[in-house]
Amino acid sequence: MKSDRALFVFSALCLVAPTAGGIELPAMFSHHAVLQREEAVPVWGWGKPGEAVSVTFAGQSKRATADDNGNWRVELDALKASAKGQLLEVEGAESGRVRVEDVLVGEVWMASGQSNMQWALSSTARAKEDIPAANHPGIRMFLTDLVTAASPQSRVGGAWNVTTPQNAGKFSAVGYYFALNLHAEVGVPVGIVRTAWGGKPSEAFTSRETLMSKPEGRALLQKLEAEVKRFDLGKAEAEYEKKLAAWEKARKANRAEKDPAKRKKLPRRPRKPSPPALSPNRPMSIYNGMIHPWVGYAMRGAIWYQGESNAGRAKEYETIFPLLILDWRKRWEKELPFYFVQLANFRMPTSKPGEASSWAELQNAQRLTLRLPKTGMAVINDIGAAKDIHPRNKKDVGERLARWALANEYGSKDVVVSGPLYRAFKIDGSKARIFFDHAKGLKTRDGREPGRFEIAGKDKVWHWGKAVIDGEAVLVSSEEVSEPVAVRYAWASNPEGANLVNGAGLPASLFRTDNWKLSTER
């Protein structure tokens, strides 16, 4: 897998002028593309200023006139799903013709986030058995180049790839398994647009305008502006040259050492400096380079797996993550369905109640995002790994995301979308009764009594609770808490023993009923 640096593209590369004398289409309108069915489909590009442009596809022909900057745009009428590759043809009255072959019509979804969404199918638990079987002409994935920019761009690199054993290994594994489920159940082509980038925070995927609308976003932008003011490219490059020279010297000395035992493990090669605004770790940079170029491309919705890089800033994430969803919906001018993954269990299990966990706080911030309409959350606190932030089981993740889409977007009536999600609680004497959504067939995964429930009284001291399933609710109590006021479930980075599931075997999300300030909150 190429390094982030090798794939990194500066914003200047996105500012290339249209092909001299010719019609140009953005990269998304290229061979093997998938267009969204059953809704108007915009097609746009560049040509000579003022020239007439015609776009022909699936029996339709639309015309437009390029503006003074050469920009043109048409809108195809709603298309019927088609697994037969068709020709998209664009012709300029003065600047020639572009032919895009093997274009399908079906369902298009954006798959974004950080490394667990970017994670390649070749590096998953089922790679050896699933890649040789990955022969699905009706599933395509656009692998968007990793690009940042200081301002919103109209161009982005990348290409559509047909699912074959030769191509599938580099696909987003979560995106692939999500598409595989949709393709099988809905029976139409599926296009996945991968815009994920490992190790990056949610604010990098959000526009400046939207970040400016909330104090939390403005604070992040102000921090970036201060960095920009302090940054001196000349000094940074001089320092880089010094570090590079020292590194090269050490590397040569290491090579010259004949005794292998005396050779040292060298640090990474120094990275060439770039302006803070182009850092993929900073606000809006990925949005400008990788999301904005896609704005307007017809698609059904988005799936998202991210949050690891925001762990430790959960309170801020409660605002920043919903802002991202609202931002994208504003850009596409529709209420895009947005289905996301709650972080998996990670780090070593804990054994004491009441322990602070920034990981759990981030998971809870994700759960609270379900307040937004047309959102859904895949809970995966049962498939993580204590020492690996990248769980190799991506099949269950993609399938759990697909449950939300199948039920809400495609009318699958028998699909259970989620494990139990906390709804409310009520104090019954010395017990707390917890109510859930999606709790039909409430049980435990292992047949034991429900574990990892904590209960506290007014003193805010947490004790392990005894939990009993009562229909679609859970009763929680403790001999040490005569007058309970709050309950938590699975409140840990790795809540070993959390075993509550519904009849479909889907795990319950963590939750807290209290609003007490946590020790890790800023």
Image (cartoon, rainbow, N blue to C red):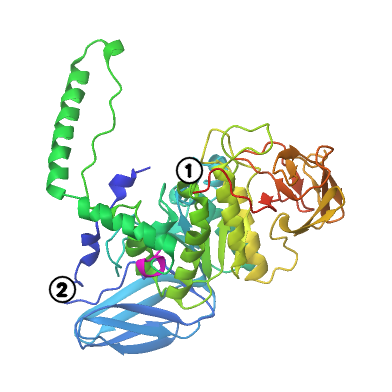
Q: Quadrant of residue 25?
A: bottom left
Picture residue at 18% right of the left edge, 33% below the top: 243
Residue that carries the numbered disc 1 in the rendered image: 122
Q: Quadrant of the N terminus?
A: top left
| Left/right of residue 38 with respect to residue 473 in the rendered view | left
As drawn, is 186 to the left or to the right of 474? left
Tag 1: residue type? Answer: Ser
Determine if residue 246 is in view: yes
Query: Was residue 209 drawn as part of the magenta stretch in this picture?
Result: yes
**Badge 1: residue crowd in 10 Å (few <14, some 14–19, many ≥20):** some
Where is residue 85 drawn, in percent x and y? 45, 71
Residue 139, percent from left and from top = 51, 61
Q: Let me know if residue 59 is in the magenta part.
A: no
Instruction: For mark 2, give the secondary structure.
Output: loop
**Foreground of the two, 482 or 57:** 482
Alpha-carbon neighbours of circle 2 within 10 Å: few (<14), some, or many (≥20)? few
Q: Which segment did they paint magenta?
A: 206-211
Q: Is residue 76 above or below residue 386?
A: below
Look at 84% across and 38% down and name the residue there. Answer: 479
Please tell me in which quadrant of the rendered image residue 437 appears.
bottom right
- Could you tell me which residue is drawn at 21 percent across and 72 percent down? 18
Indicate the position of residue 522 as horizontal and vertical percent values.
Answer: 49, 49
Q: Which mark is residue 20?
A: 2
Reply above or below: 64 against 463: below
Residue at image position (29%, 13%) is 260
Q: Secondary structure at mark 1?
A: helix
In the rendered structure, the answer to whether residue 56 lies left or right of residue 499 reads: left
Magenta-highlighted stretch: main secondary structure? helix
